Amino acid sequence: MDRLHVMGVFVAVGEEQSFAGGARRLGMSPPAVTRAIATLEERLGVRLLDRSTRHVRVTEAGQRYLDDARRIIAEVDEADEAAAGSNAAPRGHLSVTAPVLFGRQYITPGIVEYLRRYPGMEVSAMFVDRVTNMMEEGIDVAVRIGELPDSSLRAVTVGQVRRVICASPAYLAEHGTPSSPEALAQHVIVMSSGSSTPPDWRFANAGRSQSLRFKPRLVVNSNDAAIEAVRRGFGITRLLSYQAEALLASGELTLLLEQYATPGVPVSIVHRDSRQGSARIRSFVDLMAGRLRAEPILVPSA
């Protein structure tokens, strides 16, 4: 069996954490996938996957092999694309990630347009409110909101969103409207955080940056949940402007402390670097960058 094909089978099973899932993804029968993995492990002389009745987990050796296999397959794809010429339509698979709400509202329509434009492409989209490890998780393109750390990844900045403080009219009618950042300490605070330590809220106050930390009554791990709690009249929360846009327009939420707003937060499309560049990645980044720069909710970067 072709070694590159077997690598692809292992990558599919490792990413799906399932022989059946890998088989569905590749259009193969589960027994054929099982045989391919058994042949690979026998040739290498090492166990790559731990099997149980419900799950398949990648071993430590398997994780190293998975990372290498992803890189090798990507480089072979890029070599094929370079040989076919820059005018060849992209073909193959692309994995994309973005924050949940942003992915649903702005990235999914772009993916649909991309797939219609390029019939030879397939896309896997993972929308999560955390920063993914692109190499370990096999991600080709990520949409990131916030300052980017230095890395070997390439980034295209497409605009900015703002941080906004919001509450429902019902909450404000009952508890009053805070007139300053410090006054928020007297209110019910709802936070969305992936950390056990509540993040500081930053404000621009009289030309200087002010950082305050509040004790939340409610901490949730998804922006959707924070929005729903505040929409129901429970407390004040901080959101990104695109998350609150529809509810502010409908009057279900009210914007607070606008005069203390901080500078915008950059929105970037991040992708891995490569020697030749990839038609799959390049075509997707170009399409998505054009779409996002045309979105009214994204303010052009300074």
Image (cartoon, helix red, strand yellow):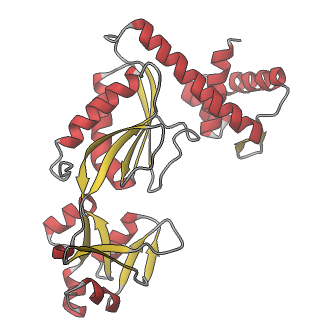
**Which one is nearer the viewer's eye here, 260 or 167?**
260
Rendered image quadrant of residue 163: bottom left
Give residue 165's position: percent from left, percent from top: 26, 74
Give residue 96's position: percent from left, percent from top: 42, 38
| Residue 27 appears in the picture as rendered | no
Residue at 70 percent of width and 35 percent of height: 64
Q: In this image, 226 relative to 175: left or right?
A: right
| Location of residue 43 with respect to 112 vertically, above or below | above
| Location of residue 143 with respect to 162 vertically, above or below | above
Quadrant where the N terminus is found in the figure: top right
Residue at 42 percent of width and 27 percent of height: 122
| Location of residue 265 with respect to 62 vertically, above or below | below
| Location of residue 299 with respect to 194 vertically, above or below | above
Give residue 68's position: percent from left, percent from top: 64, 29
Rendered image quadrant of residue 237: bottom left
Residue at 29 percent of width and 43 percent of height: 157
**Which one is nearer the viewer's eye here, 102 or 208?**
208
**Which one is nearer the viewer's eye here, 111 or 148?**
148
Q: In this image, 131 relative to 189: left or right?
A: right
Give residue 292's position: percent from left, percent from top: 23, 42
Figure disc tally: 0
Residue at 24 percent of width and 59 percent of height: 264
| Residue 293 appears in the picture as rendered | yes
Q: In this image, 249 relative to 77: left or right?
A: left
Q: In this image, 83 relative to 185: left or right?
A: right
